[in-house]
Amino acid sequence: MKLTSLLATAALGLGLATAAVAADKTKVGFVYVGPVGDGGWTYEHDQGRKAVVAEFGDKVETVYVENVAEGPDSERVMTQMALDGADLIFTTSFGYMDPTINVAKKFPNVKFEHATGYKRADNVSTYSARFYEGRAVQGTIAGHMTKSNVVGYIGSFPIPEVIRGINSAFVHARKVNPDVQFKIVWAFTWFDPAKEADAAKVLIEQGADVILQHTDSTAPQAAAQAAGNVITFGQASDMSEYAPHPRVSSIIDDWAPYYIARTKAVMDGTWESKDTWDGIGAGMVGIGEISDAVPAEVKAEALAIKDALADGSYHAFTGPIKKQDGSDWLGEGETADDGTLAGMNFYVEGIEGDIPQ
């Protein structure tokens, strides 16, 4: 056999071997609404992606696209991932729901996981965390810590997930401080540091000395730090660079165990469409260290609520609770069902203002 033929045969063999190795890898894609360096929501999802790499090594290949706008652009990104051979795609923002469903129809052999949505298909699962449990802990601290009795809340979009959080924080702040008021500013963005900072400044000007946020950047933390006498809570990630003050605690989203489990399910052929909604007890919602800026007795009370939520002995929405219009919602000792929470579109009694439509 000529040398050129031997080389060609060897090259062909090497190519086939390389292709076989590539075929053995499970390819996992992630679609992010913000930058991986946002310090909040997207940062924590990317920590989950890195955990998948650490767990499976060269058996997995991960890809991601950051700063993907909700809507048609996300559909294009998902489609390209599927065309590029992704076996599993995590779409990590509420506004990706319909695009995920649309793309999944075109690629029935690709598995999709959509965060915080409610539409499923044979190849589409949904997953979210019970962030409202963390808001109960934050509300307890906020109600105790405010001196002005004004707590500011930066909302992203008026979807059930965000409304649940506002209601939970308010209910628990009112439990420890009947005089507390919430002022809410809607940023209509998940990640826009300039808008988030402006929202925080507006709330501070309105007398808020505690700021909660359901947006993704650390800009509100910086605004509070500049104000000097305002406390904050980290959102989605610990934001501990602002501890011990203004950031006195945080809600931490830990997606790593879920991402590892779902990737493994694709690898071993056991993946099936399901809905997952876990909280503090399952470890999907973490409470960041409560700093020494919080009095010891307040810290103890907050941790007691955290433990009760974790072991199921307490539900964040336990009656009596009325709706904003004064109508009864939950009777004495009654707890909210998941269906109502999943579609929550009302404020509880005591919150002023309307939910934007």
Image (spheres, helix red, strand yellow):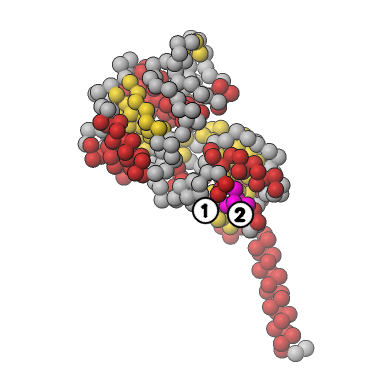
Figure check: 312 above or below 119: above
Residue bearing the label numbered 2: 81
- The foreground one among 207 and 275 is 207
**Residue drawn where x is 23% and y is 37% of the image:** 227
Mark 1 element type:
strand
- Amino acid type indicated by mark 2: Met
Q: Residue furthest front?
A: 357
**Residue drawn where x is 37% and y is 31% of the image:** 185
Residue bearing the label numbered 1: 65
Determine crowd level at label 2: few under 14, some 14-19, many 20+ residues with C-alpha closer than 10 A.
Answer: many
Give me the C-alpha separation between circle 1 and circle 2.
9 Å
The disc placed on residue 353 is: none
Instruction: Name the image quarter holding the N terminus.
Output: bottom right
Q: Residue furthest bottom?
A: 2
The location of residue 192, given as percent across then percent down, is 39, 44
- Total numbered labels placed on residues in the image: 2
**Residue drawn where x is 24% and y is 23% of the image:** 147
The location of residue 340, given as percent across then percent down, is 56, 22
Q: Residue furthest left?
A: 228
**Residue drawn where x is 29% and y is 33% of the image:** 202
> Can residue 47 be seen by looking at this rendering?
no
Q: Which range is magenta? A: 75-81
Q: Is residue 77 magenta?
A: yes
* Labels 1 and 2 touching (C-beta < 8 A): yes
Mark 2 element type:
helix
- The foreground one among 172 and 203 is 203
